[in-house]
Image: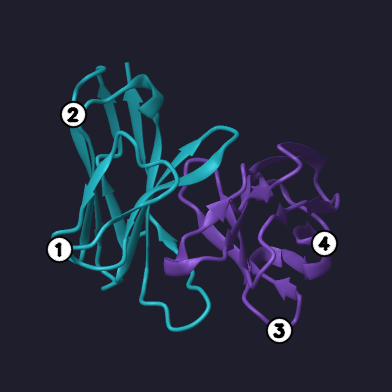
Amino acid sequence: AQSVSQHNHHVILSEAASLELGCNYSYGGTVNLFWYVQYPGQHLQLLLKYFSGDPLVKGIKGFEAEFIKSKFSFNLRKPSVQWSDTAEYFCAVNSGGYNKLIFGAGTRLAVHP
Amino acid sequence: NAGVTQTPKFRVLKTGQSMTLLCAQDMNHEYMYWYRQDPGMGLRLIHYSVGEGTTAKGEVPDGYNVSRLKKQNFLLGLESAAPSQTSVYFCATTGRIVSGANVLTFGAGSRLTVL
């Protein structure tokens, strides 16, 4: 079965620190990859996505992710985090029909001022 | 998120009770999904629908039933609630997939507690 692994369950950073959240998936075929964010008390919102083309994808709020096919990875990065980035981040992969997404367990990020 | 509305937002049930969660969308989307979110487990797909009158099982369908009698509505039912079904339930939708994949639009969630 396909799976998505997010290695960091909780991350605590100070403002202006750099962020990298790991995501690995198990499916070896063509994949579509996503990062969603859930701010406290809110629903999931799309941060960025990779469908094809340039493996370095830029999303909203200064986030970016790099698709490395050989490593089955899609890590999320931000050079300088802000307090408002405090949220839970989910990596997801869609590799089957009907757009069904497989989500990772999530990484809870806390940014201290 | 005005496009996908979930009701109710909160509900407390006793073990054995039944209830229905409603997901309504006004975006004319073909595909609809029900996920549950549990701490440390991310979101897991319960059931999904690719069009009016069709439903299919996801990763964790046991204990749940669904119906899609109208294109805009996707109902999730619990016939006999169990404490293990305490969770936050999210509905998501997307339009017909032309190629590759689409981005899902999520509802605000429904928090269900089963005592």
Q: Classify mark 2: residues with Cα within 10 Å, few (<14), some (14-19) or many (20+).
A: few
Q: Amino acid at mark 3?
A: Gly
Identified at 55% across, 32% down, the residue is B39
For marks 3 and 4, give the CA distance.
17 Å
Residue identifier under label 2: B18
Identified at 55% across, 62% down, the residue is A46
Q: Amino acid at mark 1?
A: Lys
Chain B hue? cyan
For marks 2 and 1, give the CA distance.
22 Å
Chain under label 1?
Answer: B
Query: Is the residue under label 4 in contact with that under label 1 (CB below 8 Å)?
Result: no
Query: Is the residue under label 3 in contact with that under label 1 (CB below 8 Å)?
Result: no
Q: Amino acid at mark 2?
A: Ser
Is A92 in front, or is A81?
A92
Residue A71 bears which disc, if any?
A: 4
- Above or below residue A109? Residue B105 is below
